[in-house]
Image (tube, rainbow, N blue to C red):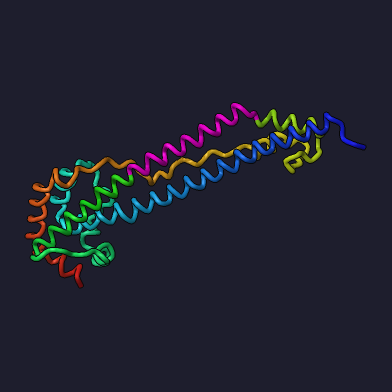
Amino acid sequence: MKPNVEDVLAVELKREIAERYFGFRKMIEEDTLDLMEKIKYQLSILEKRISYELIRIYILLYDETLIQKFMDLTGWEEKLFYDPYITESPTIRKKVFRGIKIRGLTRAGRFKNLVFDAYERLVAHVEHYRENLEEIETSRETINEEIELFYRKNDIGNIMGFMRAMEGEGSEDSMGVKPAAGSVDAFEHKMRIAKPPPIDPELITIPPLVPLPNISRELKKLVDKAYKLNRGKILAEIAS
């Protein structure tokens, strides 16, 4: 027996609904995976770049008073990643300075360049981090808005009810899912498109840093004091 026109139209309608739903769901899942990768990369900037540059500066300045004056110069209120232990630990010192090039003709010049170069890299990393964080927040908001818009235009509850009504209760629907009796709510919940999870709380908001040219004179004074305090011993330890 050939299917009548109503059956053909019903099949086409269900196919269109399924394609619209699964096409959108796939797009959201791909966007969410991309967002998760961006968050992972952002954490690496914070943990492997920003933290390392700060720790290098803390070690070089060494004295807690000088470190606090450095923070005052930068415009930051909080000493991120700071612990007095890091300025004393030979293991941390070797780890964070591994692969760092030391330039300059005199010991004092090399010491000063280590601090200034670390700060310049820190400024660049912070700027990059701030731009990425803004992009991540915007991407997450966009995904949520797209999901909300989809549900405003496509009520999944009504769609599922419509499809079950057309095919009969308890039968397998056109999406290949057979809801058990009394599990309509669970079925609809399963079909709902999940919003991306909250942004990792470790991705803290970091204020911008004062550019090096704006603080170079005052920073040089701190560097000179730090060099006199440890007599540049750190240079020998780094080079060893």
Please state, as top left, top right, bottom left or bottom right, where the N terminus lies in the image: top right
Q: Nearer the viewer, residue 176 or 206?
A: 176
Decide: is 131 above or below 105.
Answer: above
* Identity of the residue drawn at 51% across and 43% down: 31
User: Is residue 44 rendered to the left or right of residue 70?
Assistant: right
Q: Position of residue 139 (x, y in %)?
A: 45, 39
Q: Nearer the viewer, residue 180 or 115?
A: 115
Q: Main secondary structure of the magenta part?
A: helix
User: Is residue 174 rendered to the left or right of residue 200?
Assistant: right
* Identity of the residue drawn at 41% across and 38% down: 137
* Identity of the residue drawn at 74% across and 34% down: 14
Identity of the residue furthest to the top in this view: 152
Q: Position of residue 103 (x, y in %)?
A: 16, 64
Q: Position of residue 148 (x, y in %)?
A: 55, 30
User: Is residue 19 rendered to the left or right of residue 231?
Assistant: right
Instruction: Please tell me whether residue 92 belongs to the stretch shown in magenta.
Output: no
Q: Quadrant of residue 177?
A: top right
* Identity of the residue drawn at 78% across and 31% down: 9
Q: Magenta span covers which residues? A: 130-155
Instruction: Please tell me whether residue 144 belongs to the stretch shown in magenta.
Output: yes
Q: Quadrant of residue 161?
A: top right
Q: Nearer the viewer, residue 166 or 50?
A: 166
Q: Position of residue 192 (x, y in %)?
A: 62, 37
